[in-house]
Amino acid sequence: MGGTDSTTISELYRADPVGTGLLVFGPVVVAVVQLANSLVNGLSLAVAVPFAVVLLAFAALLAQHQAAMHRTRELRATVDLGAVSRLDRR
């Protein structure tokens, strides 16, 4: 299922800044804040570190999903433009 097309985070951010910010950067911020909260309040890192790792993995999956959605939107736009240009030639 792996593809050769790679979409960068900056491309995703330019295309959909709100969605990318919430879905990709949001979990990363929550993970960092949770680790800082554990350190400041003297809580066990045995819970905070796995929580942060899971959130970072979740953010990576969300980034892949955002990239796939971005590529799908670009493909649909290309196909729609191709259909319009074929109609113009008739």
Image: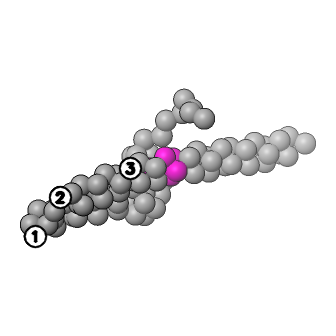
Q: Quadrant of the N terminus?
A: top right
The dot on residue 57 is 3
Q: Nearer the viewer, residue 44 or 62?
A: 44
The dot on residue 41 is 1
The numbered mark, 2 or 3, whose residue comes first in the sequence reads 2
Write the start and end of the magenta stretch as one range.
63-67
- Crowding near pointer 1: few (<14 within 10 Å), some, many (20+)? few
Q: Main secondary structure of the magenta part?
A: helix
The nearer-to-camera label among 1 and 2 is 2
Residue 18 visible at all: yes
Inspect the image, locate mark 1, and give the three-letter code of the amino acid beneath it.
Asn
Is residue 5 within the magenta segment?
A: no
Disc 2/disc 3 C-alpha distance (Å) = 18 Å
- Locate residue 75 relative to residue 69 in the image: left or right: right
The numbered mark, 3 or 1, whose residue comes first in the sequence reads 1
- Residue in the image at 74% along x and 49% along y: 80
Indicate the secondary structure of the residue bearing disc 3.
helix
